[in-house]
């Protein structure tokens, strides 16, 4: 029962904080590129399973800045690591699911960017040396 109330409180906080989003630059040299541990190891379809803790869609129109990204704050199921996933921006890129989302090994991208722009609450901070990855996220239907 406590988990349900905590979840509702977090959702309310997210809704309230979304009204106070601002554009922030994230300097990637202060973070650490994640070595994502794959949970399934098929040669072709290796993937990592994550749960989305927070999602911050880009509030700016995509395509104007190539550095503009959606931000997913995720927890990898197998390791418990927090991953900051930078994904292509756009409303069609947003996932309506939060549990059991996949990062496919073939979709992890290497970007030569020094910074990215995210839309986050004013008080949101990504800790130094936090692990990040550039990738799209997927939800697979059975």
Image (cartoon, grey):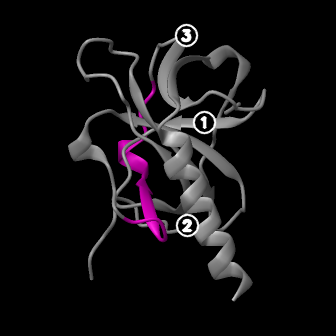
Residue 88: image quadrant is top left
Residue sitting at the far bottom = 1
Q: Residue at x 63, y 27 (%)?
A: 122
Residue at the image position 39 percent from the left and 66 percent from the top: 97
Residue located beneath label 2 in the image? 39
Q: Does the magenta stretch include residue 69?
A: no
Q: Name the residue under label 1.
A: 132
Instruction: Estimate the spatial distance between the alpha carbons at disc 3 and disc 1, rounded to whole Å.
Output: 13 Å
Percent from the top left, x then y, of residue 24?
Answer: 55, 18
Work out whether residue 121 or residue 43 is closer to the camera in this orientation and state it: 121
Residue designated by label 3: 114
**Number of other residues with Cα within 10 Å of mark 2, as a class: few under 14, some 14 to 19, many 20 or more:** some
- On screen, residue 9 versus residue 45, left or right, reads right
Q: In which quarter of the image is the C terminus?
A: bottom left
Label 2 and label 3: CA atoms lie apart by 29 Å
> Could you say whether the residue bearing mark 1 is in a helix, strand or loop?
strand
Pointers 3 and 1 in contact (C-beta within 8 Å): no
Specify whether 111 is left or right of 124: left
Tell me if residue 41 comes above or below residue 37 in the rendering: below
Among numbered discs 3 and 1, the one appearing first in the sequence: 3
| Residue at 49%, 51% in the rendered image | 15
Which of the two discs, 1 and 2, labels the residue nearer the N terminus?
Answer: 2
Which is more foreground, mark 2 or mark 3?
3
Location of residue 138 by image quarter = bottom left
């Amino acid at each position: 029962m406590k988990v349900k109330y905590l979840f509702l409180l977090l959702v309310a906080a997210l809704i309230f904080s979304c009204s106070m989003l601002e554009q922030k630059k994230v300097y990637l040299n202060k973070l650490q590129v994640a070595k994502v541990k794959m949970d399934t190891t098929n040669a072709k379809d290796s993937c990592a399973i994550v749960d989305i803790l927070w999602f911050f869609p880009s509030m700016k129109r995509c395509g104007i800045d190539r550095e503009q990204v959606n931000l997913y704050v995720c927890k990898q199921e197998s390791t418990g690591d927090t991953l900051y996933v930078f994904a292509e921006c756009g409303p069609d890129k947003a996932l309506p699911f939060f549990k059991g989302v996949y990062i496919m090994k073939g979709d992890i991208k290497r970007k030569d960017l020094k910074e990215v722009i995210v839309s986050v609450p004013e008080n949101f901070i990504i800790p130094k040396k936090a692990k990040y990855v550039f990738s799209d996220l997927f939800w697979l239907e059975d």
